[in-house]
Image: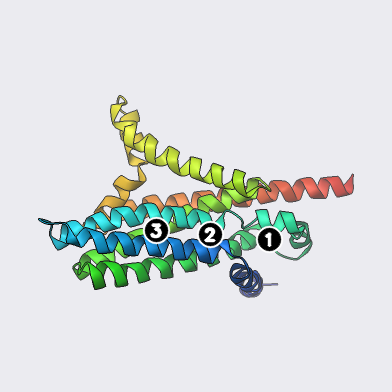
Amino acid sequence: MNQSNRLTFGLSRIKWIFIKEMKSFFGLNYPPVSLGIIALLCGIVSALLPSTPGTTYEDVSRALFYLYYVFILVDGLLLSIGAFVQERRQGTLELLYTLPVTDLELVLAKFLPGALFISVFSILVTAIYVVGIAEAPYYIALSGALGLILAGLFATSVALFASSLTGSYLISLLVSAGILLLIEIGGYYGGVLPSPAKEIATHFHGLSQFAPFARGVISLKACVFFISLTIFFLFLTVRVLESRRWRLQAGGNG
């Protein structure tokens, strides 16, 4: 089989699992509810902030995006913490291992639904709340929406990694939240460290990397930061699944 055929079959397998995940998403209660709750919170803060006296549209939009950054991280976790936990509880993860699906294809297929919902959600809340209600400038809205998407993809990859480690929703949530808190809090307090640890720690402060997007600036460094971390945690997820597959095969051979 040549490279083109491998790619075609790989994409078809990813599509099959992606459709399965989309059906599962709408069959569960907590993912749609989490999106609704986050959207409600976004609406509340967008309605309250513009009424604050002495603030400009730029100030309001920047404050909104900082709050939305926190919301989008939470939403990314809630959408994906059960990706592999659910498979383990239903006993279908081992079934997936018997299919001609690689671990990379499985991870990508699990990642894409959360990435899709995060992207659409980020665009909608920006268009409705930041542009429609807060009347923010379009250049800030565009950069802010891009920043939210990148941050959401990062949070989704972290949650996916956490879900591959355990069969418990709670533990998956705690692990993923702990990773995000370590990055945010560790980066925030990295300023008290001596060089070069100070520069390294502050570089891994997610909110600082997101800040240019909230000001209307598309930062290449920030894009690389979020994309690199997303790829890193997807890679870790693949390795976890490879390890689990190897153990199952070794146990079966034994």
**Residue 192 drawn at (x, y percent):** 29, 27
Choose mark 1 or mark 3, whichever is in front: 3
Count the numbered circles shown.
3
Amino acid type shown at disc 1: Thr
Could you tell me which secondary element the residue under label 2 belongs to?
A: helix
Above or below 191: residue 248: below
Q: Which residue was labeled with disc 1?
A: 102
Q: Residue at x 69, y 50 (%)?
A: 242
Amino acid type shown at disc 2: Leu
The image's mark for residue 150 is: 3
Q: Quadrant of residue 154?
A: bottom left
User: How far apart are the two marked residues, 1 and 3, measured between alpha carbons?
Assistant: 26 Å
Instruction: State left or right for residue 17 relative to residue 59.
Output: right
Choose mark 2 or mark 3, whichever is in front: 2
Above or below 86: residue 36: below
Q: Residue at x 43, y 51 (%)?
A: 228
Q: Earlier in the sequence, mark 1 or mark 2?
A: 2
User: How far apart are the two marked residues, 1 and 2, measured between alpha carbons?
Assistant: 23 Å
Could you tell me which secondary element the residue under label 1 belongs to?
A: loop
The image's mark for residue 220 is: none
Q: Which residue was labeled with disc 2?
A: 79
Q: Quadrant of residue 149?
A: bottom left
**Residue 160 drawn at (x, y percent):** 57, 53
Q: Residue at x 34, y 57 (%)?
A: 68
**Residue 232 drawn at (x, y percent):** 50, 49
